[in-house]
Structure formats: structure tokens, C-alpha cells
Amino acid sequence: MPRLMHVNGPSRVGKSTVARRYAAEHPGTLNVDIDLLVGTVDGWRDDFDAALSAARELGAARALAHLRNGGDVVLPQLITSYDASPWAQELAEEAGAEYIEFALLVSRDEHRRRLEAKRPDGEVDAWVQETVSGSDGALLDKIIADLDDYLAGRPATIRIDTGAQTAEETYELLLRALRE
């Protein structure tokens, strides 16, 4: 049975890094990185929410097709109570695939440190980093609160504290959880 592995969590916790590595080490796995797709939507800087919505639709269509063809999908994407539904799980159910959700978590202080220290991977990444870190903590607090609210109703989500972990250790913890 194909599976959709959703790697959830706030910016800068390692979602995309883990997803890239997993896909690279598991041939045939499709990495659907929505943040990369946002950058392909013309005008994304002017209306990020509209571009994100379009990118999610495109990513969902790609993931659905791949799952229906028997392939696994890894989806590094923040989903919170703001989104109003666990759409990644609904996508897996529609495809008849197994759904596994990971939440990569970190303390607020460590999250702030990572936001300030990380070099962005592209234009969208730089924009998100600037927007989140430039809001005097208000947007960061909202994202964390919305994620906490979302995860409160998701007891099956596998939570991984990345605060004291290297990217390698976080990846190993994810693999171990998949084996168990």
C-alpha cells in the first residue's frame, strides 16, 4: 500500500531537509515541497495566500496521481488549525494510501534562533523567513498556537523534538518511528 508521509512543523525545524533526504534514499518516492511550488505561481509576493492555495492544489494533484500509481509521497508542509482541515490526511484517504504524520517540534527560543541563523534556500524561503522573523514575534506566536491547536486533536501524530537534535539525528528518529 502506498503511503503519504506528512512532515509537519513550523518554519526552520527541518521539514524540507528530512523530506529531501528521505526521497533521495527511497527511490520512487515523490517529494511534494509546497514551498517550492509557491515560487512557480506568478505574483506570489503580491498575494502569498492565493499562491499558497494554488501551490497546494498543484501539489495535491501530483501527490494523488503518484499515490494512485502505487508510489510513496513525502510532504513537508505546515498544516495548522488555520487550514481548517487535515487536508493531507484526506488526500491519502482519497488515494487509498496509508497516512503517517510527523510533527517536528522545537521550543520558541530555539525556533527564534534557527530563524535568525538559517540561510534561506530560495526566494520563497527568504520571504517566509523575513515575514515570520520580522513580525516582532507575533506571527511566530500565532503559527505555534495554531499548530498546537491542530496537534491537540491529532493523537496519532508522531512528535519529534528537534531542539537538541542535528538534522541527521532528526532523520534517524523519523526512520526509527517508521520502522516501529
Image (cartoon, rainbow, N blue to C red):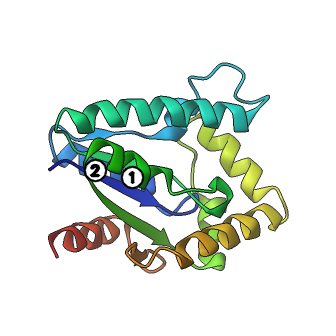
Residue beneath label 1, please?
A: 17
Give the percent coordinates (x, y) of residue 72: 22, 45
For numbered disc 2, what is the local secondary structure? helix
Residue beneath label 2, please?
A: 21
**Position above or below: 148 against 10:** below
Evaluate whether residue 76 shows in this view: no
The residue under the point 77% across, 31% down is 47
Give the percent coordinates (x, y) of residue 171: 29, 65
Q: How crowded is mark 2: few (under 14 residues within 10 Å), some or many (20 or more)?
A: few
In the image, what residue type sits under mark 2?
Arg
**Proximity of marks 2 and 1: CB atoms separated by less than 8 Å:** yes
Viewed as shown, does residue 117 lie left or right of 74? right
Give the percent coordinates (x, y) of residue 18: 35, 56
Viewed as shown, does residue 61 lie left or right of 12? left
Q: How far apart are marks 2 and 1 (CA)?
A: 6 Å
Viewed as shown, does residue 164 lie left or right of 143? left
Give the percent coordinates (x, y) of residue 99: 31, 58
Q: Residues within 10 Å of mark 1 (few under 14, many from 20)?
A: some
Evaluate whether residue 80 shows in this view: yes
- Choose between 161 and 47: the one closer to the eye: 47
- Choose between 168 and 178: the one closer to the eye: 178
**Position above or below: 122 against 98:** above
**Position above or below: 80 against 162:** above
Q: Quadrant of residue 135?
A: bottom right
Tally the numbered discs.
2
The residue under the point 59% across, 65% down is 114
The residue under the point 34% across, 50% down is 93
For numbered disc 1, what is the local secondary structure? helix
**Position above or below: 172 against 83:** below
The residue under the point 66% across, 70% down is 144
In the image, what residue type sits under mark 1?
Thr
- Choose between 71 and 120: the one closer to the eye: 71
